[in-house]
Image: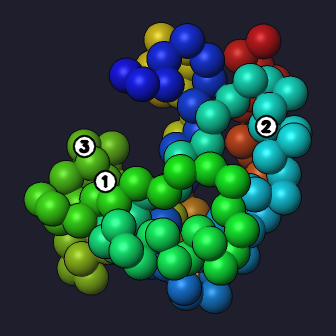
Amino acid sequence: RDFRGGPVVIAFYPADWSPVCSDQMGLYAQVMPEFKKFNAEVIGISVDGIWTHLAFAKDRKLNFPLLSDFEPKGAVSKAYGAYEARVGESERALFVLDQKGIIKWSFLSPVGVNPGADGILSALEKLR
């Protein structure tokens, strides 16, 4: 609810510090000027705790919030259908929500593949 009124990009990812997650979140920080052209907010979510998120965000110079889906573990990921119970982590899933909070685009990426930003930018363009 805090982000209603503009587009929101939710990026679920398995874990801070993993190579693919580091690349993915770092890419979103670099592409932030493009996201801002659409007035979009970006939120990263994993089951890691707040202290891990703080260290990861500082080290990777992330310019968007990371939310902890730690306890109850994976509750937010589960609500979006983006939780992998077998390994106890979020899947690598992207969602673009409109200004009312309605999901307008989603993408589930293989865990070992950085989904990039092109799909997100195309979805944001369609919201205009």
The residue type indicated by label 1 comes to: Ser
Q: Is residue 10 left or right of residue 124?
A: left
Residue at 75% over, 45% down: 119
Name the mark nearer the viewer: 2 or 3.
Answer: 2
Q: Mark 1 or mark 2: which comes first in sequence?
A: 2
Residue at 28% over, 59% down: 69
Q: Which residue is mark 1?
A: 77
56 vs 74, nearest the viewer: 56
Q: Quadrant of residue 105?
A: top right
Residue 94 visible? The answer is: no
Q: Which residue is mark 3?
A: 79
Q: Are marks 1 and 3 in contact (CB under 8 Å)?
A: yes
Image spot of residue 18 (x, y percent): 55, 87
Q: Mark 2 or mark 3: which comes first in sequence?
A: 2
For marks 2 and 3, give the CA distance. 25 Å
The residue type indicated by label 3 comes to: Ala
Q: Of helix, strand and loop, which one carries label 1?
A: helix
Give neighbour class at mark 1: few <14, some 14-19, many 20+ (Cα, 10 Å): many
Residue at 19% over, 52% down: 75
